[in-house]
Amino acid sequence: MKFTRNLAFPILAFALLAGTQSCKKEDVEPNEPTPTPAMSSTYDYEFNNGQVVPTAAYNGMHMDNLTASITVTELSSSTSKITVTLNNTISGQTYHTHAHDAADPATTPNGTPYNETPNTAVYTQMIMGNGGSVSVSQEISMSYSDITTSYDGFFVVHDPLQAITTTDISTYLIVGSFARTQTASNLKSMTFPYAFNTGQVAAAYAYSGAHNSSLSGDLKIQELADGTSRVSVMLNNSMDGEMYHVHAHDAADPSTTPNNTPYNETPNSGLCTMMITGNGGTAGGSQMSSMSYADITSVYNGFFVVHDPLQAITTTDPTTYVLLGLFARS
Ligand SMILES: [Cu+2]
């Protein structure tokens, strides 16, 4: 008892010094010997934007607003509880969440810097998404000190929207060292809102058609660690089952375009050319772009266009555009 208590206080001091961890004491019953304070720390994880492996930022269909945390709580001198929380989950999807032991890539079958088989004695759980935040806990036979200072492994959240793989890190929604404070990535991100097209760009371009005018959009540009970007679009109040064509159209001199449009009619597939199926609520899509965050948000000159799914697509008549605005500008 005395030994454990002496061990706990230097850890507490270190945790306070680190500044991002929290410790709490349990209530003390009167007239009982003072118990060892139960240690607890929470570690936050950003979405996989290439912080750990710059060439392997997540590339898939999941929205990049998913985040996670690990809370390690001391249960006894030799046992702990691991609680993992996922935020912004997709309802009904099963997230495989694992601890993968670090390993020398020269010794692993596929050159991974970790064992591909997750460590079930540390943490291996499936989490059912609920559309919001959801937590799961696992009690383990490892001390608080060992899990937070000695154990060397990775925390991985696998994508539920594609086949699970333990070699392709670009399928990991989240990856970072397990139960350690993560270095702030400082990767830039900005979201640009678009209201329904009522003629904001030009009065003559105001939408004309049968689509509900409650539709709005959010365009998010996320800087990735290798200097490229992820472009994500959320359509709010989308119509269930309707297919929306979402495009970046480069600005152009109308005296040079075939139909005198102030933009190229062919969308810019290297920046934003995606189809999003409406679901009656908020539906999303995303793609990778080799353009830098700075280029997209301050140099690129073009239009964000969402075409009406209720009529034939045309690139010459902006009154068929349900959303229209300058791309990635507010
Ligand atoms: Cu278009």
Image: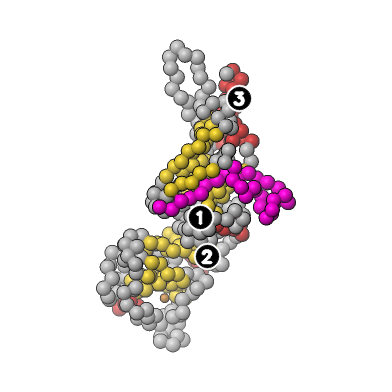
Residue 203 in percent (x, y) is at 30, 76
The quarter of the picture where residue 302 lies is bottom left
Q: Residues within 10 Å of mark 3 (few under 14, many from 20)?
A: few
In front of the other: label 1 or label 3? 1
The quarter of the picture where residue 239 lies is bottom left
Q: Which mark is residue 288?
A: 2
Q: Secondary structure at mark 1?
A: loop
Does the magenta run of residues contain 179?
Answer: no
The residue most toward the right is 106
Tell me where the magenta segment starts and ends, as one range. Answer: 92-119
How far apart are labels 1 and 3 at the CA level?
A: 39 Å
Residue 67 in percent (x, y) is at 47, 49
Residues marked 2 and 1 touching at CB (< 8 Å): no
Q: Is residue 24 visible?
A: yes
Colour setting:
secondary structure
Q: Which mark is residue 159?
A: 1
Residue 83 in percent (x, y) is at 49, 38
Q: Amino acid at mark 1?
A: Asp
| The N terminus: image quadrant | top right
Judge: label 1 CB < 8 Å from ligand 1. Answer: no
* 140 relative to 211, above or below: above
How far apart are labels 2 and 1 at the CA level?
A: 16 Å
Which residue is at 60% across, 24% downward?
7
Q: Secondary structure at mark 3?
A: helix
Label 3 belongs to which residue? 7
The dominant secondary structure in magenta is loop
Q: Amino acid at mark 2?
A: Met
Judge: label 3 CB < 8 Å from ligand 1. Answer: no
Residues marked 2 and 3 touching at CB (< 8 Å): no
* 62 relative to 46, above or below: below
| Side (left or right) of 53 relative to 30 | right
